[in-house]
Amino acid sequence: MNFYSLNGKAPEVGLEEAVVRGIAPDKGLYFPESITPLPQSFFDNIENLSNNEIAFTAIRQFVDGVIPDTALKDIIADVLSFDFPVVEVEENIGTLELFHGPTMAFKDVGARFMARCLGYFSAQKETQEPVTVLVATSGDTGGAVARGFLNVEGVDVVILYPTGKVSDIQEKQLTTLGANITALEVDGVFDDCQAMVKTAFLDEEITSQRKLTSANSINIARWLPQLFYFLFAYKQAKSKGKELVFSVPSGNFGNICAGMVAHKLGMPVKHFVASVNSNDIVPEYLKTGEYKPKPSVATISNAMDVGDPSNFIRIQKLFNNDLEALSQKLSSYSYSDEETKAAMQKIYAETGYIADPHGAVGYLGLKHYLKDHPDAYGIFLETAHPVKFLPVVNPVIDAEIEIPEQIKAVMDKEKHAIPIKNYDEFKSFLLS
């Protein structure tokens, strides 16, 4: 399969080039040339398939002709080495827990899949050309990418994160590994980090000396594997016999976009809800029809502090840039920090379930939608373990959260990060 730029001014490329480039020469995101629905029998029998079988069937068309089936099965087996349970929270509401991987965040699958694809491509070459992976993080992406790419031969990773705007545990996960991982602590917000990464890709002084790619969800290999989550959830919820609604805590909109790809593959879904914090660009767009990026606002659900969601253009493409058609399948609601805390408190008091701030936003959006659609079954995504946000969670629910082994392993390690103030300093680092 080939991939084309959504800006429409760059040639189509194969999977390897799309993954290694990250972003097209015309600054556009890559998008698959086609999405062929899976046979109805796949969904009829999905509960009898393993997660590995589901993932292989779903992703195969996108890597066809580049990664052979045997290698793809090995990659998937390595990537999906943990569970993705749907946990009942209350009647007709479950949460899909995506935090059982090595860094306890939903980014683990995409980061591991992309790392293993790059490893496969590199192994096929007689002489390796080193690749530098650039990634901007608002929280969990950095740790997942750092862990997923650690010691991958021929790959150096540079992570940019905004100082003071990720949790202590998130910072430890991306600044303590060493080896081929370097962390840059940016004096700014996530949007500044993302802008620096995008600018570097188009800076010929840099690209003439270093082969760059991105491990943000703009990268096709980081983004597409997230469709697995929705298929795994459908497999578990199918027996409910109800129409399914997904509420996805959304920042850069890669996760919910991947869910919509699962729907385009034929997965039955009644509706998607993009639940956001105070960064309300998409809710406003759905109301007014005008897409107006703006500077991001810092919140307690920091992984969603994005003022210009990169992947929203992919969602628009899935619906042929038809706002009316998109609105029939997508709603989006915005919630303040106070509303988020109140939701965390309510969920814990009434059910005993501890939600992290992002999951709580997802819960709020789902409850809003289900008010008018009580016959549906709703699933909100828990994208990170609450232990990663202890300064927020502990005062709200007043409960002791057990520290998982994955987190204990980094708590006492020493942080190593290089402070940078602007793009010129970033460029100097890359050229040094």
Image: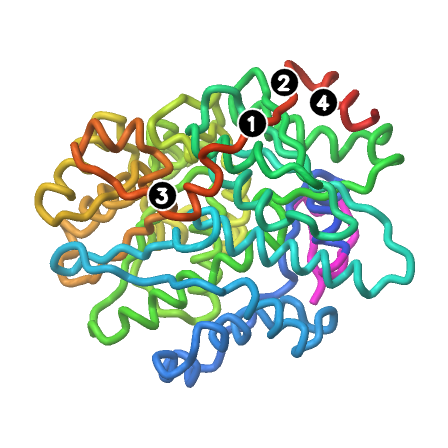
Closer to the observer: label 2 or label 3? Answer: 2
Q: Residues within 10 Å of mark 2 (few under 14, many from 20)?
A: some
Q: Residues within 10 Å of mark 3 (few under 14, many from 20)?
A: many
Residues marked 2 and 3 touching at CB (< 8 Å):
no
Quarter of the image where one finds residue 357:
top left
Marks 4/1: CA–CA distance: 19 Å
Residue at the extreme front: 412
Marks 2/3: CA–CA distance: 30 Å
Q: Nearer the viewer, residue 310 or 145?
A: 145
Instruction: Give coordinates of residue 379: x percent, y percent.
Output: 27, 56
Please state, as top left, top right, bottom left or bottom right, where the N terminus lies in the image. bottom right
For the point 77% across and 33% down, the residue is: 202
Q: Which mark is residue 419?
A: 2
Please state, as top left, top right, bottom left or bottom right, where the C terminus lies in the image. top right
Quarter of the image where one finds residue 387:
top left
In this rendering, would 402 be left or right of 217? Answer: left
Q: Nearer the viewer, residue 169 or 355?
A: 169
Q: Give amino acid for label 2.
A: Pro
Q: Give amino acid for label 3.
A: Pro
- The residue at which mark 4 appears reads as 426
Q: What is the magenta range?
A: 1-16
Closer to the observer: label 4 or label 1? Answer: 1
Marks 3/1: CA–CA distance: 29 Å
- The residue at which mark 3 appears reads as 249
